[in-house]
Image: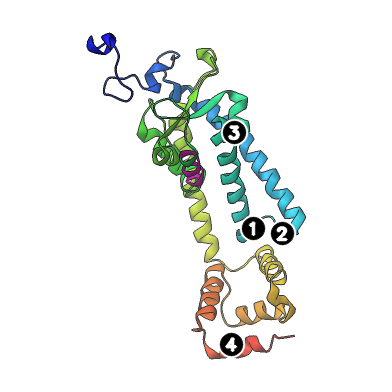
Amino acid sequence: MDELAHGSVAPPRWPGTASVATAVPTARGQSAPEAAIRARFAAAVIDGVIVWIAYLALCLVFGWRVFMLAHLLAAIVIDVLYHTALESRSGQSIGKRQYDIHVVALDGSRAGVEAIALRSVLRIVDAVPAYWLSGLISMLRTGPERRQRIGDVAGGTIVVDRSGLPARLRTPGWMLPAATILATAASAVSLWTVLHDANTPLTPAQRQAVLSSCETSPDARFVSCSCILTAYEAAGYSTPAELNQLDGELLAGRAPRWIVLSLQSCRR
């Protein structure tokens, strides 16, 4: 009571209370979240490899094609469960443990399961449109004292470095801006490629991929996939965008009747 009366102790989270960003020792002026950036990138590589191996094992067990969109959703689920399960226990995934970085609440306390789960689910948002661009932009926007990706902002978490590495091994100031610029450029190239390919006639490899996808579907027992694709192309639907449009029209019952009749001739 005497200490409170003399104002020497501030209650937790009151204005003026030191945050984790200022309470943790710094290296050459870097706060703990700033110093953790380099380790976060390296840890993400390790964790990505682990998740990818788990996904490949799942594909092997169930006989899935590795790069089919529906199956890639399983990789996202594995990624979310992996990070939620490990980081809700200790604040560390396997990759983070390797570099001694931790996910904590903003006040430096242990992050709750709900916060970790939300942070993990929003990894999907941070990764769009490609190469983790949204997450990198968010880390730039939130500044050196927090360096939060979108999942961190929503979950009220930060990632701190407790490794005690010397300053020369910590994050150089140019790393995050450079990574963001590279991700922006790579995302732009990827988007242009997708849009260009969507409006270009199928290549032999793409045609084979379409046939393989069709032949692994349940309907392949009743129809000839090569006959269907030939009918599509004869009707003038020769690009990925046109084929997707036609599939949507067929599902909605809005496809031209003559196309429907030609597809009926492809039944086995």
Answer whether labels 3 and 2 touch (C-beta < 8 Å). Answer: no
Answer whether labels 3 and 1 touch (C-beta < 8 Å). Answer: no
Q: Tell which tag, 3 or 1, sits nearer the viewer.
A: 3
Distance between the alpha carbons at the discs numbered 3 and 1? 24 Å
Q: Which mark is residue 71?
A: 1
Quarter the N terminus occupies: top left
Q: Which mark is residue 93?
A: 3
Q: x, y (%) of residue 128?
A: 47, 48
Reading the chain from its start, which is encountered first: label 1 or label 4? 1
Q: x, y (%) of residue 52?
A: 66, 45
Answer whether labels 2 and 1 touch (C-beta < 8 Å). Answer: yes
The amino acid on which the numbered mark 3 sits, given as a three-letter code, is Ser
Query: Which residue is label 4 attached to?
Result: 260
User: Is residue 178 part of the magenta span, yes or no?
Assistant: no
Which residue is drawn at the image coordinates 58% and 86% (left, top)? 259
Q: Tell which tag, 3 or 2, sits nearer the viewer.
A: 3
Q: Judging from the image, what secondary structure is the residue with disc 2 in?
A: loop
Q: x, y (%) of residue 188?
A: 46, 49
The answer to whether residue 202 is above or below residue 13 is: below
Reading the chain from its start, which is encountered first: label 2 or label 1? 2
Query: Which residue is label 2 attached to?
Result: 64
User: Is residue 118 part of the magenta span, yes or no?
Assistant: yes
Distance between the alpha carbons at the discs numbered 2 and 1? 7 Å
- Colour scheme employed for the rendering of this structure: rainbow
| Dot 1 alpha-carbon crowd within 10 angstroms: few under 14, some 14 to 19, many 20 or more | some
Q: Which residues are magenta?
A: 115-123
The amino acid on which the numbered mark 4 sits, given as a three-letter code, is Val
